[in-house]
Amino acid sequence: MEKSIKVFAPASISNVGPGFDLMGFAINNLGDEIIVRPNSQKKLRITKITGDKKTLPLDINKNTATVGILSLLNYIKTETGFDIQINKKMGIGSGLGSSAASAVAAVFAINQYLELKLSKDELVKFAMVGEKAASGSFHADNVAPSMLGGFVLIRSYDPLDIIKIDYPKSFFCSIIYPQISIKTAEARKLISKNIALRKSLNQTGNAASLMIGLMNADYNLIGRSMVDEIAEPKRASLIPCYDRIRTNALISGAINCNISGSGPSLFSFTGSKKSASSICESMVLACEEKSIKSESYISKINSKGVIELS
Amino acid sequence: MEKSIKVFAPASISNVGPGFDLMGFAINNLGDEIIVRPNSQKKLRITKITGDKKTLPLDINKNTATVGILSLLNYIKTETGFDIQINKKMGIGSGLGSSAASAVAAVFAINQYLELKLSKDELVKFAMVGEKAASGSFHADNVAPSMLGGFVLIRSYDPLDIIKIDYPKSFFCSIIYPQISIKTAEARKLISKNIALRKSLNQTGNAASLMIGLMNADYNLIGRSMVDEIAEPKRASLIPCYDRIRTNALISGAINCNISGSGPSLFSFTGSKKSASSICESMVLACEEKSIKSESYISKINSKGVIELS
């Protein structure tokens, strides 16, 4: 039997307050597992998807995983055939970087299988092509953290310049995923193509100070900086329990509470697991009050990113 | 004879690439000296200004120094009379925070004279009122570094939130002041009130990564991050030797080269005094080629800000 490769790419939280399209971090446990096996037809095929409630396309030109792989195979001019199995271990449309995890896992698996030895930094752009199939736009704030792990800033898209930064190692992240549906592409349409200079300056000030807060482990500054004036004010209206979730989280000790990506998930940071649990409980309660089912998770920031499973 | 107080507030470089209205640092040698003496008329008076080529107003409601003082006196509800002497030790309209230095020195001198014991952070807002008299807008990216010293980020104006950050202690700054006239208020009118989201995101990415670069003493990252997409593209046209100055500076080893404030001065960072000298010479040459007189300065980042002189 020819060898197969199994990899796991983590879910991720993007935007992180003022970092719309620019910042994200990887989390633990949630993510996508992808198994790559060679096939004799010299064709790329998706043979099986689990955990997706039959919502993801098997068409290789539509699935983020295979769109990413095709981009990579085109770059290296290889036509080797692969059978791809995708085991989703996270919600789809959660705002936690589900499509990015698929694309990252797929691209990384091919890199490992063919021993291409491309660096993770180099692989990001192929995964971005994959993710564009789902989100409709070319962005890296989920793909980069899922690939690289840790907390990342995308300084520039042209040229692509991704920077990993230090963050408080004591950080716990509390995540609530209200079971409502938001399409990333729809959520992006809410964002104006032009913004007031004053808002832009506020966003820039907060993004810059968030970096300082994270690098200095200054919880208070991190909290003050986690304000989004561009995306979150528009997207909050799509989440009926948004205000209550935030209020409950803050009362329970969160240093702030923001939408993850385009939502509907929200997340908070805090400095202890106990506090993270209390915050999660309070956020679940906020959803229950609005009769919205939810799932909640506690995670440290995942420092590894995508990994090959033995 | 009643006591007098003499203080010195340093010049400063604002914007610093992507930090329009948000970032600045103080420099050495250039700045404003202010002497405060009590008078018996219970009135605030400007008795003398030196070094200004008779360009600054003696009217206490127009001069930045006394506008700042009046704002502070109004806050503490004191009517004590003072005679103010201003010794300008820097060019006016240079883009190096001349009006901010006046306002900072004046406000700080009164604080020292009356032993108000207001912190430098508290004094910033009174100096901002003073500077508005010259620039026409309420901003702190010169006032805050001149007051506090070091490299500062203004995270937020409402509420005012000023953060001091680490920077490479080996940094030298090369400054060129082409002897052309640019009015801050005029330069500000060039800036659009609305900007494209893409530009805003680029600015935010660069501002955030500049913080990382400064804190990690990562010269390459600092250089890549010192890009201004909002103010500098508009203001460069006001400085006839802009392109040549930048090119010469970069060839001579500058990690980047940007307009200081609203110009016409430009500045560069580098890691040694020798390199800073070469950069200065090359920038002076760029001005000479356009038959523009210039002054040049080399400075470390001034860590102290305003000080009382013995």
Image: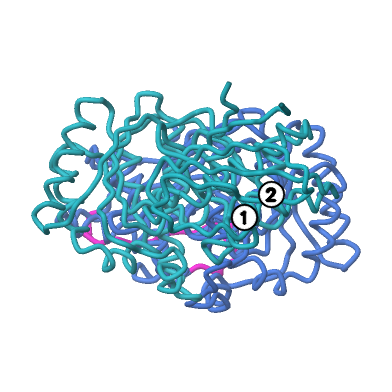
Chain colours: A blue, B cyan
Q: Sort mark 2 into few (<14), some (14-19) or many (20+) by Cα contacts within 10 Å.
A: many
Q: Circle 2 sits in a helix, a strand or a loop, which is it?
A: helix
Kind of residue indicated by mark 2: Ile
Identified at 58% across, 73% down, the residue is: A187
Give the x, y percent position of residue A61. 34, 70
- Does residue B230 show up? no
Nearest the eye: B165 or B281: B281
**Left or right: where B230 falls relative to B86:** left
Identified at 60% across, 40% down, the residue is: B163
Identified at 29% across, 59% down, the residue is: A158
Q: Quadrant of residue B267?
A: top left
Give the residue number, with chain letter if any, for mark 1.
Answer: B130
Give the x, y percent position of residue B140. 57, 51
Nearest the eye: B297 or A41: B297
Give the residue number, with chain letter if any, for mark 2.
Answer: B69
Q: Is residue A282 magenta?
A: no
The magenta span reads A40-56
